[in-house]
Image (cartoon, rainbow, N blue to C red):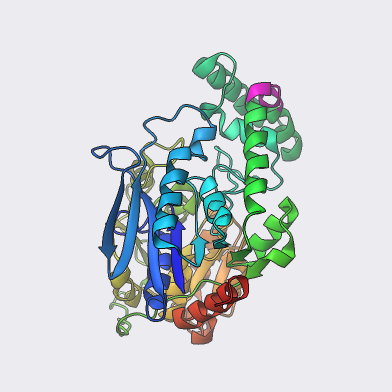
Amino acid sequence: MKIVHALHAFPPFSRAGSENYVEALAQEQLRRHQVIVFHRVADPERPEYEVSEASWESIPVVRVNRTFRDLGSFRDSYQSDAVAHAFGAFLDRVRPGLVHFHHVTCLSTTCVHEAQQRGVGVVFTLHDFWLLCPRGQLLRRDLSLCERHDDADCVRCMAHQLPIRGGHAGTLALDERAMQIARWPLPERVRRRIASRPFAREAASLAAIRERTAHVREMCERVDRFVSPSAFLRDRFVEWGLPASRIVVADNGFAAPHAPVPREPRGEDGRLRVVYLGTWIPSKGVHLLVEAFGGIAPDRAVLDVHGYAVPYDGFDDYEGHLRRIAAGAPHVHFHGRYGPADVPRLLARADVMVVPSIWYENSPLTLHEAFSAGVPVIAAAHGGMQEFVRDGANGLTFRPGSARSLRSVLERLIAEPDLLARLAPEKGEIVGMQTHASALEALYAEIRPC
């Protein structure tokens, strides 16, 4: 079978969880199939919508350049006739049997239409909540969870891209009013409703959000089957309206490390070695982890934070914020970028990994990497993470969004040395990429029998 994987970014330009997953999946499938990756790049030095071909780690790739330099409306942020046309021309040339979409953000929702109209099978993996939340993570701009969002909530979060009366000044005025309401001594549910009300009266903006919602629902009708790496994510989309019968729950597959790395023994100081791996963005809750460490004695534990900061709406200097929180904490160390091949070595130096995400993580890559290395995980007790981290068995959990709760869990590990030894991830908890790819290929065959 000829398979196309389509997504918003890909190595070497981006190395987040979904990109690394698609890279590993494509390499495995290349053993038995023809595989091509179609993805977006953003190069301001090249013509907009230019299509180019290349190869990455033996994987044929086709890239479309989109920098949003001609963005004219909110609709343009998710729907692009130029990108869809380029994708359609690509499909006409390569004639795949199936397209596996992993994200259409920064591409175009109508890429799905291009595939379906040509009789190509369509599979869509739900890596996050972007189809029902324009921000992708069900987090409001103040980092509060949007548990039961409606279109008025979306207007407030996306106000800077929508036609608010009074332009930018009007948006700021409405947002300031909402933030004042957020400080009123009322139940949170009531505050949220009142704070969203001014935005709900912005008829043009509300219409733009509703147009997106209707368009995405129509796009979903063109998908043969969705794949959700967690039951939690599946349930949220079922609540939104996707039929459960069209969503297959299957955890992501993970490639085995090239060579096992022996665990490094603790130093003579006996400090608990804690590690964070991943991008530094507010939704990942890195600030909670750093804040939690501020109350732990430097001679009891050490924290190594690996990764790098990426842009995030409303947080222009998140890395600076992290470093300011860590000021005066000699046991908190920030490190730079790392690649997939570095992960086993970094984990070999850790006693426990922390996944402190504020948003409803789905199936975090780093969590599975830790289990693969035999490293227990401390995770926020919500979202898909609860399906993988079993408190007291392969890790520990803490109250989401609470640095105090996280600190208590860390202090418990320090105070109970025997507890760490009892937290034992099992190899069977990890789905190997070969097994995962075979399951996907069986799904493909159901949709487009050879």
Question: The C terminus is located in which quarter?
Answer: bottom right
Residue 335 visible in the shown view: no
List x then y, in percent, for residue 272: 39, 71
391 falls in the magenta region: no
Q: Name the image quarter holding residue 330.
A: bottom left
**Magenta-highlighted residues:** 197-204
Q: Is most of the magenta stretch helix, strand or loop? A: helix
Q: Is residue 275 above or below residue 426?
A: above
Q: Is residue 362 above or below residue 58?
A: above
- Residue located at (60% from left, 47% from top): 138
Residue placed furthest toward the left: 45
Position above or below: 133 against 402: above
Q: Residue furthest top?
A: 166
How many marks on residues? 0
199 and 391: which is toward the camera: 199
Apparent side of residue 394 relative to residue 52 in the rendered image (left or right)? right
Q: Residue at x 43, y 72 (%)?
A: 25
> In the image shown, does 160 or 174 lie closer to the viewer?
160
Q: Is residue 142 visible?
A: yes
The image shows residue 111 at horizontal and vertical percentages of: 51, 49
- In the rendered image, residue 220, in percent from the top left (x then y), is placed at 64, 53
Q: Residue at x 69, y 64 (%)?
A: 246
Q: Nearer the viewer, residue 264 or 2?
A: 2
Using the rendered view, name the quadrant where residue 153 is placed: top right
